[in-house]
Image (cartoon, coloured by chain):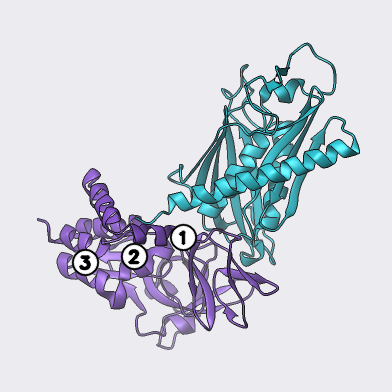
Amino acid sequence: MGHKSDVKLIVDGKRTDGREFDQLREVEMKVDVVNRANGSAMVRFGNTVAVAAAYGPRELFPKFMQEPQTGILRVRYNMAPFSVDDRKAPGHDRRSTEISKVARLALEPGLFLEDFPKATIDVFIEVIQADGSTRVTGINAASLALADAGVPMRDLVAACSVGKIEGKLVADLNGLEDNFGETDMAIAMQPGKKKLTLMQMDGIVTKQEFDDLFKLATENCSKIYEMQKKALKETYRRV
Amino acid sequence: MEKGPSIEKEIAAVAKEHPELVREAVKEVAIPGEFIADKRGRKIGHGAYFEGDKVFSKFLGIPRIDEFEINVMPLAGVYIPETGDRIVGVVNSVEVSGWFVDTNSPYQAFLPLSEGVDDFVDTQRTDLTRYFDIGDIISCKVSRVTKNKTVQVTMNDFTAKKLYGGIIIKVTPTKIPRIIGKGGSMIQSIKDATKCDIVTGQNGIIWIRGDDKAKAIEAILTIEKESHMLGLTDKIQRMLNQN
């Protein structure tokens, strides 16, 4: 990240996988994929696949974690050992702890947690195939899972990644661009309310570039938001 | 239970005949955060919230809008107790002066002694398990829910009673009205066909007793699964009349 590398990320004005700069990968969204969960969803961005399952609101144990005025949200982000080229050591690590937290902070403002004092809502995000932008894919899936679980929400949360590769601003980075690009930025927002819930950036950009990146992210989040709406409506299509 | 392709085919046939129904239905479902109506001084009921004069949906559900009230009926979700609900619960623990009841929700309900039995009880000498013991199934009414979700239930209601024998099944609470049907028609037809005693709780617990339990459960689970589909009543009727 941020340093020069030999890997060519742009060939003949196109990205390595043949996309335009502002083009998303192929997106697939499926709701209600885990039988035992209250709500669940699968989101695929190209080769990145995340499954999220939401449970609750349910009774919160250990009891000392209970909040008398409000419910709490617990998010667990996990990458499967087989999700990457080399085997990933299974279990929690620094990275997943951080992403669990930012995913929780991204989802929390969208929920009416005050409707469930003393209770908890648990969301489990499992990345089963990783090829860049896993946290935003996970957040998209988690948002769908929560809506499917019937949790009261202010708005769906749509997330997308943008970045800079070889001086060009691009949307939805894949694994290669993530590793060898100059900058990457993860954005989550509530497009219906025009509110930002997550922004993380790694790398260096100018102020102008930042503004452009942000605009690009907003546009793509709106696109993803429409796809999420469609996926939810498809599931409950009345025939 | 799954009759598979034949049902799908049937539904597809209905959809072909009445495409407007399909279009209408898909349009009808609201997504969390979706704008559903202008407030215009109306009351905001269950499942909606407002910002300024605009009303949005809280749930993935079906908006019900009339001249006085705006509601959204969620399509899924766990049960949250509300005053006046008639529920089926399982006694969880016996305390000095009452019982705790599992209500199939994030909150346990308390059944005080005075709300549980009519007779005078000397708590010093009586073992409360003679009225309700752990594992007993009761049909009761939610009498009070505080802001912090402390729930109290009562047996002072004409439907409230202890349920002997039988088994309980859990269904999605939001599907209970569909299982009961208009004026109780759906549940009555199941009762008639299977000769089972059935008690439905608004918390999604259904108590069933009788010889033909399997058939009743099959019918109920089918309703739960296909509650949003057209021609369900006929299908259930056919299913019950078979063999």
Q: Which residue is mark 1?
A: B27
Q: Which chain is purple?
A: B
Residue B190 is tagged as 3
Q: Which residue is mark 2?
A: B206
Of badges 3 and 2, nearer the viewer stands: 3
Name the secondary structure under disc 3.
helix
Compare marks 2 and 1 and give the one earlier in the sequence: 1
- Near mark 3 (Cα within 10 A), the count class, few <14, some 14-19 or many ≥20, is many
Q: Quadrant of residue B131?
A: bottom left
Using residue B80 as the reference point, say whether residue B88 is left or right of it. Answer: left
Name the secondary structure under disc 1.
helix
What residue is at 34 percent from the left and 81 percent from the top?
A: B159
- The Cα–Cα distance between marks 1 and 3, rounded to whole angstroms, is 32 Å
Which color is chain A depicted in? cyan
Instruction: Tell me if residue B6 comes above or below residue A133 in the rendering.
Output: below
Q: Quadrant of the C terminus of chain B?
A: bottom left
Using residue A167 as the reference point, say whether residue B10 is left or right of it. Answer: left
Name the secondary structure under disc 2.
strand
The amino acid type of the residue labelled 1 equals Lys
Q: Position of residue B199 (x, y in %)?
A: 31, 71
